[in-house]
Amino acid sequence: MLERQDMGDEVNPVPSAAQASWTRRAAQWSLVAMFFAFPISVALANVTMALAVLLWFVSMRWADWKPFFAQAWRNPVAKPAVLLALLVVVATFWSPATGPEIVGYFKKYSKFLFLPVFMALLVQGEVRQRCWQAFGVAMLITLVSTWLNVWIDLPWSQTRNQGFGVDHTVFKDHIAQGIMMSLFVCLTAMWAIKAESRGRALLWWFVCAMSAMSILVLSQGRTGYLGVFFAALVFALSALGGRIKAAMCAVTVAAMLVVVVYAVSPQFQERTNLALREAHSSSLNAVTSIGARIETWRFMTSSSTKMTFLGAGTGSYPVFARSYFKDPAFCAVVCPHPHNQFLLFYFELGLLGLALFFWYIFAIARRAFEVTPVHRGLMLGFVTIMVVSNMTHSSFWLSTESHYFVIMTALMMASASRAAGQPIAPRSKPVPD
């Protein structure tokens, strides 16, 4: 059985009539299904998400709305999430984008509005536990399939190339799988630390190691390389509780592991060297992964939006990008999105949008310091992955990655909070199964 994951005492208040109804329970089970679905299938994740929200809405009585809004607004991450979604709507008034393009943006960022709903469904400790377990099962399936794909041609795998030295992404794409597996590395490390028996601890450390190696050896996703390295390092430093000598030891070990992986992993070595070559030779004449990002960043940072505080408007980036990048092959890579969520928010929503995004990230990081060191490591590891991913990709603009970051934010924050929205007294020992 997967370990019970929570960041404090379970709170199981006496349910109201609406919470006890079958629609509320169905909504909670739909949410559990969504945590299993999103690492594997976008379509299934969308269906289960819509079902969870719809069933939650049906379960709400008139008397439930006022406490729901009050409780949601007390959560520190709900405010920036809702305000950011509202700014996306308001910024359409000065956007040069077409109606269909703007509607597409609404679909992408609407999940920010669902964040308070997800957290309301995650009030009960049992539901949170099932969601962590569902995510863990999905990632275990992904991990086992990734390693089996080295020797067996799996019919459900995205890649069909056996052997070492090639990419073995199973579901989604290598970037999405890499950042989700990076969090799974931190999660299994936490389960190993909290395990009540040595055998179970060894099992989770083994899964943790195999998860990290699946990123560094069996994937071509450089975002995953950065994510797992910095997330694992932050997790280790946080779990050590601020001990200087132990922290220096963790940094040294991490540096040594990078050198070892570079020496023994042809995939890691090739992709790292290629990134350096592409960065050095970036231009508008050749389409490369790193080069395209650099040229996009140059375009966005040098372009004047005339409205620095509020940006050029929702959906404006593709409009301006198409007029700047004339080469069709280059535009096909960089015109849909700039591969940097920070710059995308700044360009389209201005300093206000960028500030709200920083507030969103800061709210998660701040809450991490109200829980135990090992749980703090998990939350800060998640924040680290979020920063790394959004610096190299437009993660909240892309379906799979926005699913991941929004609903995992809900689970992280709900696991670190009481149902009433107050900080919790963390447990000193693992929660039993």
Image: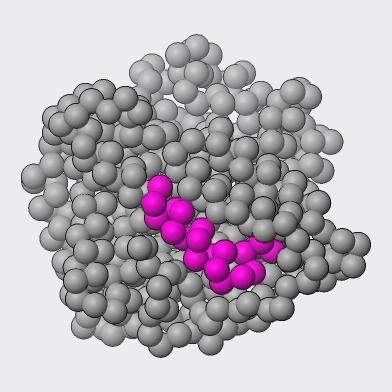
Asked if the stretch drawn in magenta spans residue 9, the answer is: no
Q: Quick check: 48 left or right of 314? A: left
- From the viewer's perspective, is residue 50 above or below residue 120? above
* Number of dots carrying numbers: 0
In percent of width and height, residue 356 lies at 66, 57
Is residue 127 visible from the viewing direction of this image? yes
Is residue 364 visible from the viewing direction of this image? no
Q: Main secondary structure of the magenta part?
A: helix
Q: Quick check: 122 left or right of 143? A: right
Q: Identify the residue at the far right of this view.
A: 62
Q: Quick check: 176 left or right of 199? A: right
Residue displayed at 50% across by 18% down: 332
Residue displayed at 61% across by 70% down: 124
- From the viewer's perspective, is residue 268 above or below residue 183? above
The N terminus lies in quadrant: bottom left
Q: Quick check: 67 left or right of 41? A: right
Between 431 and 397, the one lying in front of the other is 431
Between 193 and 220, the one lying in front of the other is 193
In percent of width and height, residue 270 lies at 18, 34
In percent of width and height, residue 161 lies at 21, 24
Asked if the stretch drawn in magenta spans residue 125, the answer is: yes
Between 420 and 345, the one lying in front of the other is 420
Residue displayed at 30% across by 75% down: 195
Residue displayed at 19% across by 29% down: 152
Question: What coloring was used for the rendering?
Answer: one colour
Which quarter of the figure has residue 46?
top right
In percent of width and height, residue 175 lies at 39, 39
Q: Identify the residue at the far front of this view.
A: 22
- Where are the magenta residues, as a range? 117-138
The C terminus lies in quadrant: bottom left
Between 239 and 137, the one lying in front of the other is 137
